[in-house]
Amino acid sequence: MGASGLGALVLAASVLVALYRSEPVLGLPPEDFAAIAILLGLGLVLAGWIVADFRHRWSVGFRALAVWSVVYAGLVAAYARRDQLLNVLDRAIGEVDPGRTAVTQAGEVVAARRANGSFTLSGRVNDRETRFLFDTGASTVVLTAQTAAAAGLRTDALTYSIPVATANGGTLTAPVVLESLSIGPIVERKVPALVARPGVLPENLLGMTFLERLASYEVRRNRLILRPKGS
């Protein structure tokens, strides 16, 4: 078996590890072991191609050696800086499609950090689509007047009696109870919330009256992870 054939076997093994292995391999997390194995397999495949080119013609072999060495060095450098590259990719995703979330097999909702450092999540209030700014500093969910009206609340009949502080200064808000509030597959009912006066609040805030009902939530690198109870 030549170097290329051996490299192909290593690549196949790395894919199997990435897909089906959950325990550490040689002391490494499965994803890290798979990534290193992929680099090794690619190196063997490229070495086989280069040797074949040398057998065909020396000039062709030297050219292949130069080109593939640069390519392989770039791949190794990318792996060494994978954390920085993932950070850039996450923030780009968060900025290009703000509010976009992904759902894991365990039912966790994952969102990417935006360029300004915040997390925006798409959700639904009383079955009406809207977006929220993740805000652990908000003791309750806070809706803009526009979102509240779209969700079927009569904003003109609300009593604005609860003072809150916003980025634009203090204002009065009205207490309400939302029939349903969902982020991805996570659905909570009878959620206490506040509605801001028109033109005061630029974004809806996903505050603690929703977040405290979750099993947990965390920020890992540039990703926000919401875990529902029972996940």
Image (tube, rainbow, N blue to C red):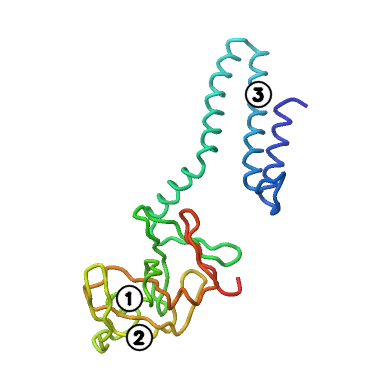
Q: In the rendered image, which residue does mark 2 sit on?
A: 176
x and y percentages locating residue 186 in the rendered image: 51, 73
Q: Is residue 9 left or right of residue 165?
A: right
SS at mark 1 in the image: strand
Above or below, 218 relative to 70: below
User: Of the residues shown, which amino acid type is indicated by label 2?
Assistant: Val
Which one is earlier in the sequence, the residue at label 1 or at label 2?
1
Above or below, 29 relative to 155: above
SS at mark 2 in the image: strand
CA gap between label 3 and label 2 equals 67 Å
Which one is earlier in the sequence, the residue at label 3 or at label 1?
3
Mark 1–mark 2 CB contact (< 8 Å) = yes
x and y percentages locating residue 187 in the rendered image: 50, 76
Point out the frontmost of discs 3 and 2: 2
Q: Quick one: 69 or 125, which is closer to the camera?
A: 69
Q: In the rendered image, which residue does mark 1 sit on?
A: 143
User: Of the residues shown, which amino acid type is indicated by label 3?
Assistant: Ala
